[in-house]
Amino acid sequence: MRFSARLGLLLDTTYILPVLGVEVEGVERVLEALQRLRRRREVEIYYSCYSILEALWKLAKLGYDLEVVRRGLSLVEEDFRQAHPTLEGYLKALELRRRGFPDLIDLLLYTTALSNGILFLTRDKHLHEFLSEEGEETGAILLEEDFLREHA
């Protein structure tokens, strides 16, 4: 894993949805903290094509304002860096899915963060528990509550 002075965070889809016009309960404090850290240049924020895909699925079910989505996607592309998956990440996600975790998108986000040496910011305690029970690396996961405890 590579580390730098700046905190690198891959955002779970939960934190990208509001940018695209979808209300998500309870994310305001996280978004405010991320914005504050960005202004101070203490964090580098990443997104994944998997989060965009998952967000589009959600938007297609809920309905959307095309202009809000356009502005939101432009903002994500301009202000965040894209974290790219690796071959090892794909295979690891597939293996973890076979071992019983149901959400392949979350697994792909986790393995993308892991293989890029950044942290995956999520509120998914079930993912953390599953990985821990399976003896997998959990240091790449930053749970929302821990992030807020340190940065709110």
Image (tube, grey):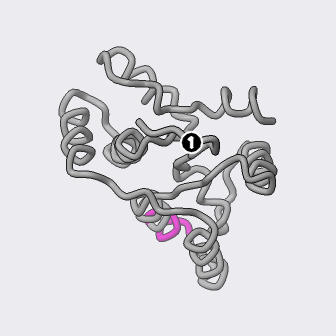
Residue at left offset 77%, top offset 54%: 35
Q: Is residue 34 above or below residue 64?
A: above
- Does the segment drawn in magenta span residue 118? no
Query: In the rendered view, does 101 fall on the left or right side of 37?
Result: left
Q: Is residue 86 left or right of residue 6?
A: left
Q: Amino acid at mark 1?
A: Ser
Q: Position of residue 133 (x, y in %)?
A: 35, 14
5 relative to 80, above or below: above
Q: Quadrant of the N terminus?
A: top left
According to the picture, the residue beneath numbered tag 1 turns out to be 4
Q: Residue at x 67, y 51 (%)?
A: 24
Q: Nearer the viewer, residue 78 or 30?
A: 78
Report the side of 21 relative to 121 (left or right). Answer: right
Q: Main secondary structure of the magenta part?
A: helix
Q: Quarter holding the C terminus?
A: top right
For the point 64% across and 62% down, the residue is 22
**Where residue 140 sits in the image (x, y, percent)?**
46, 32
- Looking at the image, is 62 positioned above or below residue 109? below
The spot of residue 33 in percent (x, y) is 78, 45
**Residue interval drawn in magenta:** 57-62
Residue at point 25% right, 28% down? 100
Residue 15 position within the rendered picture, expressed as x and y whole percent measured from the top left:
62, 52
Query: In this view of the protein, which residue sits in the foreground, 147 or 117?
Result: 117
Q: How many marks?
A: 1
Badge 1 marks a residue whose secondary structure is loop
Q: Residues within 10 Å of mark 1 (few under 14, many from 20)?
A: few
- The residue at the far front in this view is 5
Front one among 46 and 41: 41
